[in-house]
Image: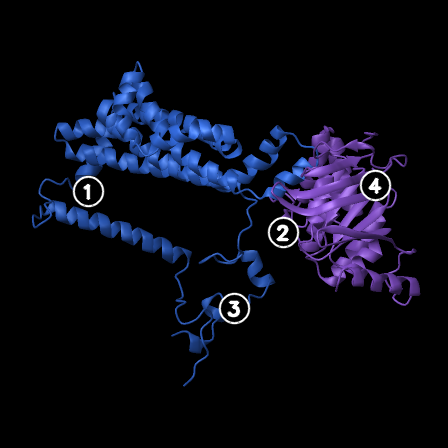
């Protein structure tokens, strides 16, 4: 029996719709938390040792207590202020230096060697430098955060600027455009997709470094609190700290991601998006080339 | 040199462009040698030659993007010092800025000239209308067809009221039908601007249709410049003078 081949080939499984995918995600999270609760609650000690591990409910209780106290919000705003200051500084400096190095041979010769030597040093290894250089811990932490984000932004800006299509610049030149006009109308907008690649990496690295720096030398801050809890054997508190870091990191990365997508909406995209449903209005109007809903698929194809 | 910004000004004259005993190319990689060329104000000169013969190099030199390796390149008797707004270049590649809508692309040269926002918007709209893109003016370049992008580039080049328009195989990637339409549009739009045009192509028929004169390139030299009989008529294939010229041009190109 030779059945009609399914559109997309035999590997194209029908994927659950939006609600189904949401349920799948929730179930995955619930399974993870359930396993954790079970292992820690029963104090399973095989090769991995869960006897000292706080349970999910312990962590939830600690979280609720922490939210009620004043320190949590101080920690949060302190960490967020540090990371935003460092990251914004890094974004401005990184883009400026990246453009300069990509566009000017002189700048590349002057700055290149120094930057290339400093770049491989993990920002957190610069803690001694920060302590020597800056009068306050606060400035030192911002310095480390900034250094961490600076290099990804610099490198991706440099690449993006070098990869610009030459005719864009030549077109503006033959309109009588000045250097500044080319910078503002060609270089920066053209490099923006690449720059945002660097910013996305940079915000992630910033979090790693702000937390580490706070653990080493902070007063207040989510990293400082997490380390404090560890030293006083408050393990549930440590998990509250980790959860906070995770959520904050996720929120800031998403913010950068969304801003990037908004600013680079001009990028040509393929019209095909995996798993996307056609917009409701278009469903009736334009007959799709291939069946998109279960109802339209002939029965012999629904295995 | 007039610097009038009124694009409808009938008194505006085209630029006269000259190359004197010029060697052209990038430093260390000369492509053309010993080029002597006079482009008269207001004329349409077409440049034909096989690919790689230096047509684009010659055009870029006239635009001011490349300096001649030796000899002189000049405009109205003065040597060229670099690119300038009164010599617009239309590229072989798609040179519209992809993050700007067609209208914003056409507005760019006007913004560079320092026109106020309302003024540049209305001028851009006028030019887009003239090339038949009113409906597309708010779209991004990748949302319109290749022919429409070509027309937008033409509008962008002419919006700045240049005294010379240098075109590098602008219709090379278009299908035959769109191409004929673009040629007609070009002739129509140029009428009354008074601008000098240097038009590079590898298509002999296009060169003979558009050009007042045809310059032939080959073997690293400018080999000949021929007058083209008028009036402009795409269907006059049996006009003896035209047939003779076409045969002559094809022979000199060695095809």
Q: Position of residue B254 (x, y in %)?
A: 75, 62
Disc 2 is placed on an element classified as helix
Tell me, by letter, which chain the rendering colours blue.
Answer: A
| The colour assigned to chain B within the rendered structure | purple
Give a yes or no on whether discs 2 and 1 share a subunit. Answer: no
Q: Please, which colouring scheme is shown?
A: by chain
Q: Is residue B167 left or right of residue A299?
A: right
List x then y, in percent, for residue A140: 31, 21
Work out whether A222 lies above or below B180.
above
- Subunit under mark 1: A
Look at 25% across and 50% down and name the residue there: A30
Which mark identifies residue B143?
A: 2
Mark carried by residue B195: 4
Residue that badge 3 annotates: A290
Are dots 3 and 1 on a single chain?
A: yes
Numbered disc 3: secondary structure: loop
- A29 vs A186, left or right, is left
Find residue A173 and report its horizontal and vertical position in percent.
66, 36
Q: Which mark is residue A56?
A: 1
Mark 1 vs 4: CB contact within 8 A: no
Q: Residue at x 49, y 40 (%)?
A: A160
Query: Reading the chain from its start, which is encountered first: label 2 or label 4?
Result: 2
Left or right: A265, with B104 as reference point? left
């Amino acid at each position: 029996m030779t059945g009609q081949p399914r559109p997309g080939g035999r590997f194209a499984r029908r994927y659950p719709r939006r609600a189904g995918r949401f349920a799948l995600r929730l179930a995955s999270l619930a399974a993870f938390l359930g396993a954790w609760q079970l292992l820690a609650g029963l104090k399973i000690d095989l090769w991995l040792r869960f006897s000292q591990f706080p349970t999910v409910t312990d962590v939830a209780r600690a979280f609720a207590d922490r939210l009620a106290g004043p320190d949590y919000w101080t920690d949060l705003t302190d960490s967020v202020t540090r990371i935003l200051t460092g990251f914004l500084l890094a974004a401005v400096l990184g883009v400026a230096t990246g453009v300069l190095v990509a566009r000017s041979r002189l700048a590349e010769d002057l700055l290149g060697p120094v930057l290339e030597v400093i770049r491989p040093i993990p920002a957190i290894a610069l803690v001694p430098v920060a302590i020597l250089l800056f009068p306050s811990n606060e400035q030192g932490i911002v310095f480390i955060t900034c250094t961490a984000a600076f290099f990804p932004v610099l490198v991706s800006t440099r690449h993006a600027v070098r990869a610009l299509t030459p005719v864009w610049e030549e077109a503006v030149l033959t309109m009588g455009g000045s250097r500044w006009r080319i910078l503002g109308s060609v270089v920066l907008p053209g490099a923006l997709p690449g720059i945002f690649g660097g910013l996305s990496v940079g915000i992630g690295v910033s979090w790693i470094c702000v937390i580490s720096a706070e653990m080493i030398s902070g007063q207040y801050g989510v990293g400082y609190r997490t380390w404090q809890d560890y030293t006083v054997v408050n393990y549930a508190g440590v998990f509250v700290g980790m959860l906070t870091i995770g959520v904050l990191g996720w929120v800031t990365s998403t913010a950068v991601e969304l801003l990037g997508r908004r600013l680079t909406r001009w990028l040509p995209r393929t019209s095909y998006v995996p798993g996307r449903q056609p917009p409701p209005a278009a469903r009736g109007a334009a007959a799709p080339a291939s069946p998109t809903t279960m109802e339209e698929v002939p029965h012999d194809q629904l295995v | 040199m007039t610097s009038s910004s009124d694009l409808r000004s009938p008194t505006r004259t085209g630029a006269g462009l000259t190359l004197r005993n010029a060697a052209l190319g990038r430093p260390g990689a000369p492509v053309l040698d010993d080029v002597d060329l006079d482009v008269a104000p207001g004329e349409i000169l077409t440049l034909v030659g096989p690919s790689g013969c230096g047509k684009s190099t010659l055009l870029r030199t006239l635009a001011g993007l490349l300096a001649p390796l030796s000899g002189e390149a000049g405009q109205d008797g003065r040597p060229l010092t670099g690119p300038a707004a009164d010599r617009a270049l239309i590229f072989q590649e798609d040179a519209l800025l992809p993050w700007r809508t067609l209208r914003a692309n056409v507005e760019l040269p006007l913004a560079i000239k320092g026109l106020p926002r309302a003024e540049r918007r209305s001028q851009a709209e006028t030019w887009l209308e003239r090339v038949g893109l009113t409906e597309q003016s708010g779209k991004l370049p990748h949302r319109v067809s290749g022919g429409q992008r070509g027309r937008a580039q033409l509008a962008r080049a002419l919006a700045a009221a240049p005294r010379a328009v240098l075109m590098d195989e602008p219709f090379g990637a278009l299908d035959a039908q769109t191409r004929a339409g673009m040629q007609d549009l070009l002739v129509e739009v140029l009428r009354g601007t008074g601008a000098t045009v240097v038009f590079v192509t590898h298509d002999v028929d296009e060169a003979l249709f558009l050009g007042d004169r045809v310059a032939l390139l080959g073997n690293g030299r400018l080999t000949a410049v021929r007058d083209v009989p008028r009036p402009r008529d795409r269907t006059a294939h049996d006009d003896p003078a035209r047939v003779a010229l076409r045969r002559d041009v094809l022979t000199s190109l060695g095809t």
